[in-house]
Amino acid sequence: MIYTVTFNPSIDYIVTVDPFELGMTNRTSQELMLPGGKGINVSQVLQNLGFENTALGFLAGFVGDELQRLITQYGINADFVRTEEGISRINVKVKNIDGTEINGMGPVISKEKLEELKNQIRSLGSGDALILAGSIPQSIPDSIYSELMEDLAKKDVLTIVDATKDLLVNVLPYKPFMVKPNNHELGELFGVELKTREEVVPYAKKLQEMGAVNVLISMAGEGAVLVDANGEVHMSEAPKGKLVNAVGAGDSMVAGFLAGWLEKNDYEHAFKMGLASGSASAFSENLATRAEVEAVYRTLQ
């Protein structure tokens, strides 16, 4: 079974406000409410691609109730730990104002509830896959990803981590199967600015030296780069298409890569599936469907 973990899920309230006037009452012209959080996005795209999976994490309050309903509605298995304090996040994303967002804090997670989630993950075994994606609430120590990876170190579980800064660096000694920073996050780790596909390659290899098995770098309009476990470099410019909604594109790339790897155990196919999935989501109002991913895949060289 594939499992995703979203420590701080949300309902994303995506609105268009046109025109927007600071200090005035503004009204939406379009609005959409979607389940949010990187792991949940990965779960949804995996489900769309035909891969059953289970979403793990924390839910709280009436927002958590609606999240549970929406996730189940998408056909995803949801096995979240319910917390008593606070509510799950509501993130407001103003679509037409340069990606302006207002993200909620999320609930406080007690040690007991955190341990409940850790026990769920400790039950994973041979043949399972685990995706750790996104930020964590302030009440959870930033060592949590590495603690989970340590718990699974002696088990044959395929692990993928999509995180930034210490959350990412701390898991590298546990040899995650794949990590997926974007070029800005990769550059931040090493104190450099990375703009081109060629520039990211040596730094992706540094992450491999630190323990990552495969390093997939998303680069928005510049495309993507994969340095695979065999040392081969796969790179591609971004597929052509109209950007509609970039939210979830990186998460879709993670889902596509895993789906491609599980389909053929071939890195070139996995890379193309990742790139096609990320782009298909960016070209769509919602996260990509299988048909949309396949349409983009056919355009890749």
Image (cartoon, grey):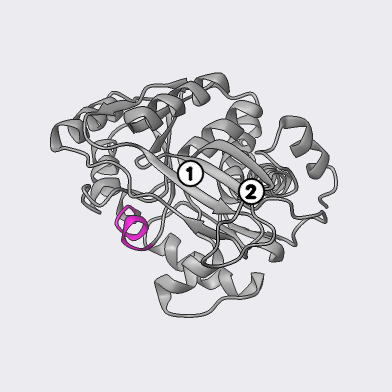
Residue 138, image x, y percentages: 25, 52
CB-based contact (under 8 Å), mark 2 and mark 1: no
Q: Main secondary structure of the magenta part?
A: helix
Q: Which mark is drawn over residue 28? A: 2
Between residues 62 and 137, which one lies in front from this camera angle? 62
* Residue shown at the point (82%, 56%) measured from the top left: 240
Name the outermost residue toward the bottom.
192
Q: Quadrant of residue 260?
A: top right
Q: Quadrant of residue 126?
A: top left
- SS at mark 1? helix
Q: Is residue 54 above or below residue 104?
A: above
Q: Is residue 215 magenta?
A: no
> Which residue position holds label 1?
38
Between residues 141 and 216, which one lies in front from this camera angle? 141
Magenta span? 165-171
Q: Is residue 198 above or below residue 262?
A: below
Amino acid residing under circle 2: Thr
Res. 284 visible in picture: yes
- SS at mark 2? loop
Res. 156 visible in picture: no
Q: CA distance from mark 2 to mark 1?
A: 25 Å
